[in-house]
Image: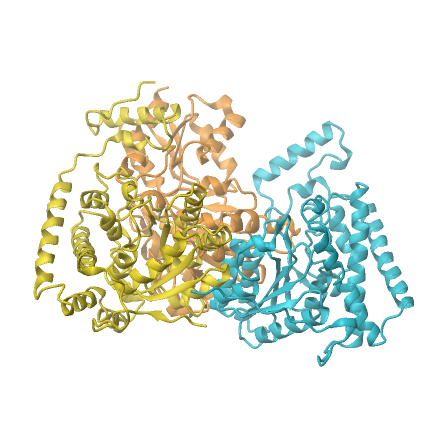
Chain colours: A orange, B cyan, C yellow
Amino acid sequence: MPTLTLIQAVNDGLKVSMRQDESVLVFGEDVGPKGGVFLATEGLTAEFGKARCFDTPLSEDGIIGTAIGMAANGLRPVCEIQFQDFIFPAFDQIVSEAAKLRYRSGGQYTAPMVIRTPYGGGIRGGLYHSQSGEAYFAHTAGLKVVIPSTAYDAKGLLLAAIEDPDPVLFMEPKALYRHEKGEVPEGHYTVDLSTLRTVREGDNVTVFCYGSMVPVVEKAAAKAAEQGIQCEVVDLRTLLPLDEQGVLDAARKTGRCVIVHEAPRFCGYGAEISAMIAENIIEYMEAPVRRVTGFDTPFPNTLEHHYLPDERRVLDAIEEVARY
Amino acid sequence: MQIETAPEPFSVIGANGDVGGHKVTLSDEELIQCYRTMLTVRAFDDVCMKLQRSGRIGFSVPNKGVEACQVGAASALRQSDFFFPSYRDFGMALYHGVHPVEMMHNMFGNNLDAARGRQMPVHFSFTDPIKYFSISSPIGTHLPQAVGAAYAHQMRGEDNVTLASFGDGGTSSLGFHSALNFAGVWKSPVIFLCQNNGWAISCPSDEQTASDGFAIKGAAYGVPGVTVDGNDVLAMHQAVSEAADRARRGEGPTLIEAVTYRMGGHSTSDDPSKYVPKETLEEWAEKDPVKRFREFLTVRGMWTEELESEWSAAAYEQVNSGAKEAESTEGPRLETIFSDVYAELPQHLRRQGEAAFDLAKRKGDADAGGGAFPL
Amino acid sequence: MVPQVIQLIDESGSAVSQLPDLGKDRLRAMFISMLRVRIVDGRMLTLQRAGRIGFVGTSTGMEGAQIGSAAALKAQDWLWSGLREGGAAVMRGLPLAEYVAQMYCNANDTAKGRQMCNHFQHKGSNYPSWSSVIGTQIPHAVGAAYASKMRGEDVVHSVYFGDGATSSNGFHSGMNQAAVWKVPAVFVCVNNGWAISVSAKAQTAAETYAHKASAYGMPAARVDGNDAVACYATMQAAVERARKGDGPSLVVLETYRIMGHSSSDDPSKYRDEDEVAGWIAKDPIQRLEQYLTSQGFLAEGEREKIEAELLAEIDTVIHEQEAAAPMALKTLVEDVYATVPGHLKRQYNDFIEVAERHGDAQPGDGAFPL
């Protein structure tokens, strides 16, 4: 089995999908001859031609708006928003159109499409190349929100997303694009949406995370193990619809939970996990839930390594929850 | 540095119904269908206004004044073409054979409405006999969608066109900018029909933009723009036919500005007397599109008082019986809140649905039907 | 109707039309500013390659467009920038030290290291902070121009953006509002041929970028962007039009981005080197140099002397900025609101406790009193 980086796995997934389904097409800013600013779409124009992988004018509203029309008319668009920070001009098309089309037409028209977008910090991208906006979208009924953290999942989830009958926002942790490597099967396979992945098993503390925070949490969990604290590490993978039963089972297993994401805390995704635990299994809890998140500030540049939750902050929370 | 100016609108039907040297390409049967559709739109407006005023439906938008735009454009297109209409395009659906009762199901938001009463009235969605794309309330969002649908036609090598219809206010929307730009670059088989009806709710079209008219906006995107008399069915038919031919030949999109006038309010919730000058309204009443088309039919010997009475009665009969049927159709069931959010019902919605049904059962809400969540 | 491209000095450096009366000193000042842009860009690129700074978007090939047009603004006018107007900012008063501090994103940076490199601001010369998100500054300029108009100020707002930005939301809404409101604004589209890897031709089907003004009832002009004097003269006319209350206009500067979009971009993947070579031959600096020399405004070999001075100038500044103090950690939570709210103080205090334990904090980074 070949070993691929996360971004190579995305690229491979796109190729596999485009080879087996002629209705799949890829477009966005700079995805053509340049192959995308991160090279996720490298080689697609060469292999599939300009009609199926091409550059658009600089308009996110246009990219998503046209994708909806393509999807409603029998194509499977996989469009790219160059940075998640640039998605907001298309917020209307995503939230009010793609996500609601099935509902508002009683299923007469649908928008099966994928919006791929790199998110998160770690590349010194400052305020506008670093944001983690998953909470805006996880609040949107009708949309699916998927965030892989491994090369294997990136390809399998991407293929599942492309084949899904509903619109999927596929957020790729750009910090892991080249740092995350793993074995990836050749050809077609899928990873079911709405299933979480147990990264590491443990009986003392459960840590929920996703995307770029998964390797950070893994390192913290390894450190915690040195002190005898065994962590159950859960990669949520699909934020909407969430594997709720899986989350509750994992939380109940230890009764001590930490939630980690790099997005700001207030009304962040972690709040939903925390509320679910409080509403459903509070009687199993041995300690208050702790969240380790980005600050409730815009994303900085020079001090980004302090903004991003790191191994130390995660470990601190694990220790505190374990000791409680 | 100069500012460009717009040409006079193109028209076919002149004074007293005379078409001068213009050739009429529609058959007699089609001409009558155009006229009868306009009468049906008027009847539909009239009935809906009464239904709204008596509190039986919540909302409607009057089409009075813009019927020629709708019908002229629709008559130039095939049933296999894809319509991306605005909320004020009733005549496009009716011309192509959507029955008034189908529209009434939406006006009443009942269980036979395609949207199961989830949308406001006038937000139609049809797939048969034409593809009439589900209407959205935010302005201009459907324009890039129409371009995307056209891309699918192009990619499959079909010669279908898409029609994107919107108002003068819609030209200020993001959707207009991105759609025209993408369509220009992609040479999309799209007809952009801008119905300049003078008003975006209460904003007059000359405060919407500083450009001289709206057709000129095509220049920004390399899309040819034409200005048409929107109260003239035959001019509309010709302009849209030519644009459709261009599109089918692979020569790309056209922007058509139909100059017309919204004779009613924006909607049943709007009081236009607050902002529409009376004199302008009177001026446009003279140019009424139905009267204008009737004059043309009279000259051709295709219209009489008797026919008018017969057609009008038939239109009212269709609309009234449609309203009656829709009103007596059962309302959407509780589970339709949860269905069609996704293709498959996810866990969290199932739980929410079950809780809603359980509560309805315990509180004795008969609508929820027995208390078991059926999805 | 395709508007003529305005050119006053041809590619050989000869005047082909009546030139504005700029005089020797202003022409030389423009020339030096253009040279400074090139020298500073070169130095920044070296620093980036050496890993000292993170990102550079150079103006190579576009110095004439930027400096020539901005030279037509008065001190009280505003310049709403895109990525590549830092050189114009320096000409208008941004201290070179602040420029370099911003490139280092260090503690001397007036934006406190929160923005990426190459995102300048200078309040003193009316050069607002820029966002990486394309086209958002355009409606901002229109609103600011509305404010100036409402207060009856003698202030014109210029707003710079690239060819790609004409597809953005901001362009559409900004241009439309500006024309309806007749605000004192000048829209400067620097058509440098490329929006990252998307060519100006693939960006729109419009015949020229000047045609876009028709959609908004606004006049437009096209200028040879590598002719700094033509850029000056055309901009001057547009600015004066706005100043008189006759409303906004669009000025399209036709030029070329010789380098990649940024230090992170490899343009050889998507464009033909011959095209680049053709534009290198139209170098705006060389053109002005030839003209100045022909007029006796620049002595033989003087360019090299000026370049040496500019190099010394930038190297001194770089040396100083390398020695900047570390960034105060409290900047993480400051300036989100006018005052730091309770929840951010608590978040910071939790954070600093861990940082101090690991020896990361400096004196002064301590907790907020709650």
Residue at the location (37% across, 69% down)?
A: A46
Q: How many marks?
A: 0
Of the 4 image quadrants, the one containing the N terminus of chain A is: bottom left
Of the 4 image quadrants, the one containing the C terminus of chain A is: top left
Relative to A262, does residue A29 appear above or below in the rendering?
A: below
Q: C369 or A44, which lies in front?
A: C369
Q: A101 or C309, which lies in front?
A: C309
Residue at the location (53% across, 46% down)?
A: A95
Q: Give the image quarter of residue C186.
A: bottom left
What is the x, y in percent for residue B59? 73, 45
Left or right relative to B25: residue C115: left
What is the x, y in percent for residue C353? 27, 24
Left or right relative to B117: residue C142: left
Q: C26 or C59, which lies in front?
A: C26
Relative to B212, does residue B28 appear above or below in the rendering?
A: below
What is the x, y in percent for residue A261? 39, 36
Can residue A185 be spotted in the picture? no
Residue at the location (21% across, 73% down)?
A: C12
Q: C285 or C281, which lies in front?
A: C285
